[in-house]
Amino acid sequence: MNKNVFLILLLMTVVSSCGTLKKNKSGIKENLIEEKDPLTYEERRKFDYYFLEAVRMKQKRDYDAAFQLYSHCLDIYPQSAAALYEVSQFYMFLGQEEKGEKALIDASRSDDKNFWYKQTLASYYQTKQNWVKAIAVYEDMAHIFPGRLEPLLSLTDLYARTKSYDNMIGVLNRIEELDGKSEQISMEKFRAYLQLGNMDLAFSEIQSLVDEYPYDMRYRTILGDVYMSNDRYEEAMDVYKGILKEEPNYAPAMVSIASYYQKTGQDSLYNIQLDSILINENVETGIKLDFMRQLILKSEQTDRDSTSIIRLFDNILKHKQPNADIPMLYSQYLITKKMEKQSVPVLNLVLSLDPENKPARLQLLSYAIRDNNLDEVIRVATPAIEYNPDAMEFYYYLGLAYYQKEDTDKALEIFKNGVLQIDEKSDKRLASDFYSILGDLYHSKEMKAEAYAAYDSSLVCNPDNINTLNNYAFFLSEERQNLDKAEEMSFKTIKAEPENSTYLDTYAWILFEKGRYTEARIYIEQALKNGGDKSQLIVEHCGDIHYKAGNKDKALEYWKKADAMGDTPEDGATPRSDAELKKLKRKISLRRYIE
């Protein structure tokens, strides 16, 4: 036999054969009393060996072997509580509940002082909704283990389920003896007395809680609330007045008085009380929010008159706010009422109280973007980078605002910082747009290698990013590099948007650079038909393509038309350089295409 196993068996044998120290009534330890082992030495040795092997098999998840070994233990010692308990769990798992229940009962009887065996049996009866048997076990446990709360708490629930309110009160009294008086126990006893129809004892129970904690106004408020919930309004009001006489700004009592006026139909007094609560700095924000939500709901369900709601919010905001909760609710209300202009100062107040409030900042940002107010976009989005550094949308709109203001250095800085926030959780389309604009910015700075790297990253995030595909393809065609790749990318754009004049122009120009002039002419003419005739660049390209296709007179016609259009760029387009405009004039004067 393994040496360690032998030592464990020896230890188990010694432990199982030992007696226990007992105390007499005075608490003094008596001499060690040996309890006679019902097994012989040889039987005990075998039992302990098989039991330990069963435990080992169970740990190895060899449950068949474990069950056989536990059963063999019972052959040796049928009254073994530990073996009976283990076998009961196997029976339960196998769905043989009758056998499992019997084994569990036998285990509990065999080791009457084992708390967990009885707890398991009681829990089993509860799952079967056999309340009578569950109660019997828990009562037995409460008798055997008088110092433990668990059986008593379970009995409270079971007596409530079976509507045995007298027994429930008895158990609650026992809990109080063990754990002291508490609000929860007193309220449970109060409800039980109400069920029994004993109103005097019900209210005296709450009164006893007040007497136990005379300086805790919360319990006095509970007493008043209990009176009011049972239509004893005068007694409730006397309690509230007594509280406010001692603590004039005690918020829960103020709230209860408001409820009193509301329940008794005293609307004018209710409104006065409500105003005093909403502007009282001692009243928690959560209570104010609850009132305002209730009032909004009531308004929406009745007259839908927003003026009174707005008046209340305005009165509240005349006073210093501890947090942004009330202003945020107000702004949301104004937005739902389509009062966007009025919501702006409230949203700004929210941000002054809570600069990290992302929804409020995004709402303000949406207004600025809609109105194309670039300075407002910059004002709102700039602090967001500090307070919400991982929110990519703020970098995006801030960078775009600087880009549109032609501050490309600042825009480039913002977008470079923005792409640093991109990770595996980022929205792929937004990340692709980031890299796309970053590529445009790099290209405007003649940083072509960096631009193409950014475009590649954009397409990794979203292979169908049309803006990236078009710009990347066009810039490659301008440099006459990777024209096959440029054509492939550009073709995707016209397939996605076959009537987009910009994309048609790019594709035509790539074909032009590849010497496929007839095809190029087809696509450039489609570009003109789809609005490209308003673009100086597209019209000039049309002339270039016609020239290479052998239509020199037509080419001159288009060059002259482009020149007459002037150098005003399309919305969002990059202005043409002086060199490009001079080149156009040279084409006209020389009547030929210039590389």
Image: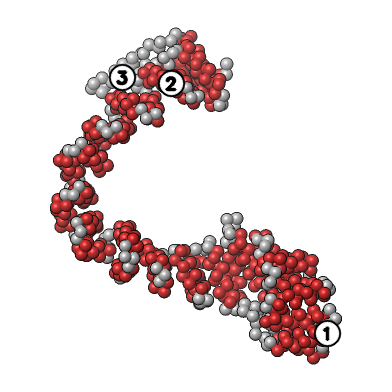
Amino acid type for the residue under numbered disc 3 = Lys
**Residue occupied by mark 2:** 98
**Quarter of the figure with the N terminus:** top right
Q: Quick one: SS at disc 2? A: helix
Mark 3 lies on a secondary structure that is: loop
Marks 1 and 3, the one that precedes in the sequence:
3
Q: CA distance from mark 1 to mark 3?
A: 120 Å
Q: Nearer the viewer, mark 1 or mark 3?
A: 1
- Mark 2 and mark 3 residues within 8 Å of each other at the beta carbon: no
Q: Residue under label 3, please give it.
A: 22
Amino acid type for the residue under numbered disc 2: Glu
Query: Could you tell me which residue is drawn at 19 percent across and 63 percent down?
Result: 269
The amino acid type found where label 1 is placed reads Lys
Contact, mark 2 vs mark 1 (Cβ under 8 Å): no
- The quadrant in which residue 181 appears is top left
Relative to the observer, which residue lies in front, 113 or 218?
218
In the image, 108: left or right of 89? Answer: left
Residue 39 at x, y = what percent?
43, 10
Question: How far is the residue under mark 2 from the one under mark 3?
Answer: 37 Å
In the image: residue 358, left or right of residue 281: right
